Amino acid sequence: MENKGQETKAGLWNSIFPPKYDFQGMLLSQASETRDGVKAFHEWLDMDDLSQEPRELMRIEQQADDLRLRTEELLLEAFSTPFDRQDIYSFSRQMDHILNFCLSTAHEMRAFKVHPDGTIKSMTVSLHQGTEMIVEAVRIMARDPAATNKMIIGMRQSEHDIEKTYVACMAYQFTTDDVIEIMKKREVYHHLKDAGRALSITIDILHRIVVELA
């Protein structure tokens, strides 16, 4: 009877003050999966074989999605979080968008028969560089917010590079005569631009978290 009473008290206590969850660790895991997913996408581009599905990217994207869903579940349970819970949610969501756009790009390339070119690869390299820096920034942000803040400049450069590459390549496309090809490439390029936009929003949220931690 006494044990039952103790269990009831423990259950009540845990419902009011649930165990702390390692949200920074969860975001780090998802950031690592995001980086690896972009790398897998780049490796698929290097194959230049549109008959092959981007299976490794698809696998990693699913793993990252599972991590995001788990983070969202624990956010509902957590009594407190190390930083703003809305920022945790939004950061996780935007990282998810990065891989979603990479996967959409691959699917459209296969559907529209658009082979990898210098523009697509350049934008993907910039995206990968940005996600690599995000992984390192999330790893150290709690213990060294100042160093993380300095890294944000480099991250923003990656996003700017994607935007500049997109504008330059579309300016060139509009000098050509094949309207259908222009439309197909514009769709593909724009999805990578959207991935760059998701990267930019992720960086903005990270910056907000760092300011809160400083």
Image (cartoon, rainbow, N blue to C red):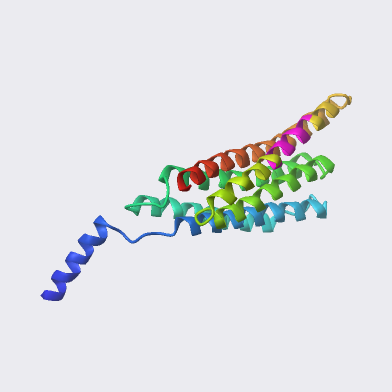
Main secondary-structure element of the magenta-colored stretch: helix
Vertical comparison of 135 with 172: above or below: below
Q: Position of residue 166 (x, y in %)?
A: 76, 33
Front-lying residue, 97 or 127: 127
- Give the left or right position of residue 80, taking residue 8 as reference: right
- Give the left or right position of residue 103, taking residue 3 as reference: right
- Res. 179 image quadrant: top right
Front-lying residue, 103 or 51: 103
- Res. 94 image quadrant: top right
What residue appears at the point 73 percent right and 45 percent down from the top-left corner?
126
Q: Quadrant of the N terminus?
A: bottom left
Front-lying residue, 146 or 204: 146
- Give the left or right position of residue 76, taking residue 174 as reference: left
Q: Position of residue 160 (x, y in %)?
A: 71, 36
The furthest residue to the left: 1
Magenta span of residues: 158-167
Front-lying residue, 197 or 4: 197
Q: Was residue 159 drawn as part of the magenta stretch in this picture?
A: yes
Q: Position of residue 17 (x, y in %)?
A: 27, 57
Q: Was residue 175 drawn as part of the magenta stretch in this picture?
A: no
